[in-house]
Image (cartoon, helix red, strand yellow):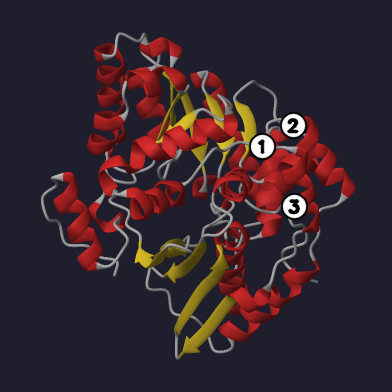
Amino acid sequence: MSIIKSIIDNDFYKFTMQFGVTKLYPDVTARYKFINRGEHKFPEGFAEALQNEVDAMINLALTKSEKDFFTTKCPYLSPAYLDFLQGYRYDPSEVKIVQNGTDVEVSVEGYWYRTILWEVPILCLISELYYKLTNAQRISNDEITARTSDKVDLYNRLDVTVAEFGTRRRHSYEVQDVVVKELTNHKGKSFVGTSNVHFAHKYGIKPIGTHAHEWFMFHGARYGFKVANSISLDRWVKVYYGDLGIALTDTYTSDVFFGQFDKKLSKLFDGVRHDSGDPLEFGEKVIAHYEKMGINPLFKTIIFSDGLNSEKVEIITKAFKGRIGLSFGIGTDLTNDTDLKPMNIVMKLTEISSIDIPWTGVVKLSDEKNKHTGTHRMIALAKEMLGLEEIPSQDE
């Protein structure tokens, strides 16, 4: 049986961005590329196994129950979009998979409103197939349940809210299912939802997410790096009119972001998400920004989501509790804490084009040097435009 069994086994922000793309940019085409940051060695036959799973996804379709779930839980998604999603089918011809020895290359190309849904399932499949085809043995479901229980006990004691963000690098569908089931059934108020829409539907919990880096990367390539953050957020408000108000900060470094996050945007958005760099430095920067704008930080929220575990959550909580609203999106530490080494893999938007512009490379300038993406030329151009010092990129 295929690994991906539901069309909504995907991160929520993929659907929220897809709605924005269908509404604002239906003629944009996009290219994505798999990046093997961990330099993992893939076994013989991996590409064929991955291709078989991708091909099987053509049969996925939104069910009536799933559509009703979106309608009830996400009233900001228009009926027209949900009708579109009901008719959407994955097209495997948009995906190219090649294996050379132990190296696997995966790329995606097509209309952005279609290809935007491929990233997360492909990463899920790569992770699960890697462990399966290398015969890696994980701990039992009971042990995973116990570890999850211990973690949520701590989060309850810390009196913080936590969401499960671990779809992209989960060990497997089964492990994520075990984790979300335990989080849902566990006593306490900490667990507030999951980024995975399928599991949110299955367990009757809240789907959580807003937008990802590609939303900002597109606007930077299309309209210019200097205005990318402000245009991205303005267009987000145009689509959602105040819903889904957490802004991602680090596509072109958080310093550049806060320089463009003016008083209007600071008041419009409920808070910000941290995804790279030192979380303690970031938290202080956010508090200082809101105070400079004359906004009480306690009325705003930071969602921390960068490589978190229980220890990091406790440190961050002690530093900022009572100073600003706090929430945590925890991924790999929940869905791939199995006594196996988690994979370090990503899939990124690399180029966009439209009727009036040729293929143009996109850039991400993270607060961590090794998370930069884009060609050396485009990264250098973006840094020059933004007044940032040149830092060598590890991703071409």
Q: Nearer the viewer, residue 365 or 352?
A: 352
Viewer-nearest of discs 1 and 3: 3
**Amino acid identity at mark 1:** Pro
Residue shown at 35%/59% (left/top)?
362
Which dot marks residue 73?
A: 2
Q: Dividing the picture into quarters, in which one does residue 111 lie?
A: bottom right
Quadrant in which the C terminus is drawn? bottom left
Q: Give the answer, above or below, for where 16 lies relative to 353.
A: above
**Residue 63 pos. (x, y %):** 86, 51
Residue at the disc numbered 1? 207
Residue shown at 44%/61% (left/top)?
349
**Residue 72 pos. (x, y %):** 79, 31
- Precedes in sequence: disc 1 or disc 3: 3
Mark 2 vs mark 1, CA separation in Å: 8 Å
Q: Give the answer, above or below, for where 304 lies relative to 63.
A: above
Q: Label 2 neighbourhood size at 10 Å, few (<14), some (14-19), many (20+)? A: some
Residue shown at 75%/64% (left/top)?
89
Left or right: residue 386 versus residue 246 is left
Viewer-nearest of discs 2 and 1: 2
Q: Secondary structure at mark 3?
A: helix
Mark 2 vs mark 3, CA separation in Å: 16 Å
Q: Dividing the picture into quarters, in which one does residue 359 lie?
A: bottom left
Quadrant in which the N terminus is drawn? bottom right
Q: Dividing the picture into quarters, in which one does residue 191 lie?
A: top right
Q: Secondary structure at mark 2?
A: helix
Decide if residue 318 is in sight here: yes
**Amino acid identity at mark 3:** Leu
**Amino acid identity at mark 2:** Lys
State how many labels appear. Answer: 3
Q: Secondary structure at mark 1?
A: loop
Mark 1 vs mark 3, CA separation in Å: 17 Å
